Amino acid sequence: MGQIQVEKNVGGIEGLCVIQPTVHGDSRGYFMETYNQNDMREAGLDMVFVQDNQSMSVKGVLRGLHFQKQYSQGKLVRVIKGSVFDVAVDLRPGSATYGKWYGVELTEENKKQFYIPEGFAHGFLVLSDVAEFCYKCTDFYHPGDEGGLAWNDPAIGIEWPMLCGTYQGSASAEGYTLCDGTPLNLSEKDQKWTGIHTL
């Protein structure tokens, strides 16, 4: 028991949690529990996960900002290789922090996890040459239910690290690079999302 430390309501946004697992290491390597239902319940986190996902992305890829409209998913996310800047945006109707965002760097070295409850949009930017990203979900993926927000919506104002470029009025990646010159890489779909004012 007690294998995690939980920082709750990060960024002043109710429900967002940064979780630090206890890592047991020696000259052979390390061991850690990446999920323990009892420890989560002790920390007041009583979610039930039904699906695990994993993705690989290369440097400069930005995925997001995504959410499901009718079947909202809570997500417990972590990085097992490389580094990403992970972001959640509060979309809960009536929330005191509606439209506010919080971001955290998740790396294979810091082993932090980020819990994003239902009612948030989510996205991440890959900062390393390659990143492998794992997440647990509280609901299944439902084709046709996906929604999204422009990753660069000025009304939200996410401060993506290492990113250079100027907002041109859309979610297009054109004109944006990482500060080392790596082009920003978004899916065609993610370049068509609009701003929070359209929700």
Image (tube, rainbow, N blue to C red):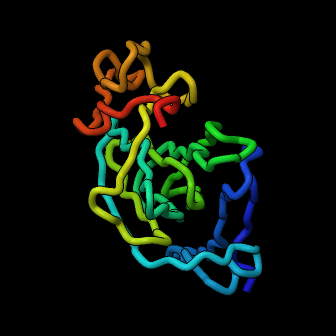
x, y percentage for residue 6?
A: 73, 65
Q: Residue at x 68, y 86 (%)?
A: 38
Left or right of 37, for residue 176:
left
Quarter assignment of residue 96? top right
Q: Which is nearer the eye, 101 or 163?
A: 101
x, y percentage for residue 115?
A: 60, 61
Quarter assignment of residue 27? bottom right
Q: Residue at x 43, y 42 (%)?
A: 65
x, y percentage for residue 145?
A: 34, 56
Residue 104 appearing in the image: no
Q: Which is nearer the eye, 110 or 115?
A: 115
Q: Which is nearer the eye, 144 or 122?
A: 144
The N terminus sits in image quarter: bottom right
Quarter assignment of residue 176? top left
Residue 117 appearing in the image: yes
Q: Is residue 163 above or below residue 99?
A: above
Q: Residue at x 56, y 60 (%)?
A: 118
x, y percentage for residue 137?
A: 46, 69
